[in-house]
Image: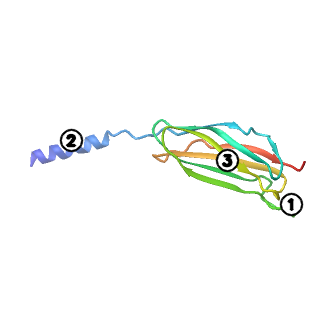
Amino acid sequence: MKTKIIYTALILSMLACKKTDEEKPEIVIDAPVTGAHFEPGDTFTLSGKITDNENLSQFKIDMHSGEGHVHKSSNGIFDFELIKDIEGTSYNLSEPIVISNDADTGLYHLIIEATDEEGNEANFIEIDLDIHNP
């Protein structure tokens, strides 16, 4: 009986000492830069790098109107969302984003998020872009 208690205590102490990953992934964006201007119908590439000390899990890209989400013309509010599973400690981000031909002009927010395998969330990146007519 004493041996069983000792083994149980030993196993519990080993499990309690298991290290968990508490380090957040990091996102670095090379392009586009805040304040970049695009026109309806343009395509641009979101490029950068996502890294983690252990193992990445997923990233999300969300682009939406920053004008209070109110329709201000007969055109449409442009929205873009991409969620992608990734793995490894480093991911080179290179995602084309096509702005619809009928996109409303104005301010847009481009938001990039990432998580690692443990569920740690990176500090998200927000880039403000301008869509305007030529």
- Residue 17 located left or right of residue 78: left
Mark 3 — residue? Answer: 111
The residue lying at 70 percent from left, 55 percent from top is 80
The answer to whether mark 1 and mark 2 are in CB contact below 8 A is no
Where's residue 66, x and y in %? 77, 52
The residue lying at 76 percent from left, 44 percent from top is 128
Amino acid bearing label 1: Lys
Q: Secondary structure under badge 1?
A: loop
The residue lying at 10 percent from left, 45 percent from top is 2
Amino acid bearing label 2: Leu
Q: Residue furthest bottom?
A: 74
Q: Distance between the residues labelled 3 and 2?
A: 47 Å
Q: Residue furthest right?
A: 134
Q: Quick one: 77 or 85, which is closer to the camera? A: 85
Count of labels shown? 3
- Closer to the chain start, of discs 1 and 2, is 2
Amino acid bearing label 3: Ile
Q: Secondary structure under badge 3?
A: strand
- Give the label on residue 10, or none: 2
- Closer to the chain start, of discs 1 and 3, is 1
- Closer to the chain start, of discs 3 and 2, is 2
Decide: is 62 above or below 94. below
Decide: is 92 above or below 67. above
Where's residue 39, x and y in %? 83, 49
Where's residue 95, x and y in %? 65, 46
> How busy is the neighbourhood of tag 2: few (under 14 within 10 Å), some, or many (20 plus)?
few
- Residue 130 located left or right of residue 29: right
> How busy is the neighbourhood of tag 1: few (under 14 within 10 Å), some, or many (20 plus)?
few
Q: Distance between the residues labelled 1 and 3?
A: 22 Å
Mark 1 — residue? Answer: 72
- Give the label on residue 130, or none: none
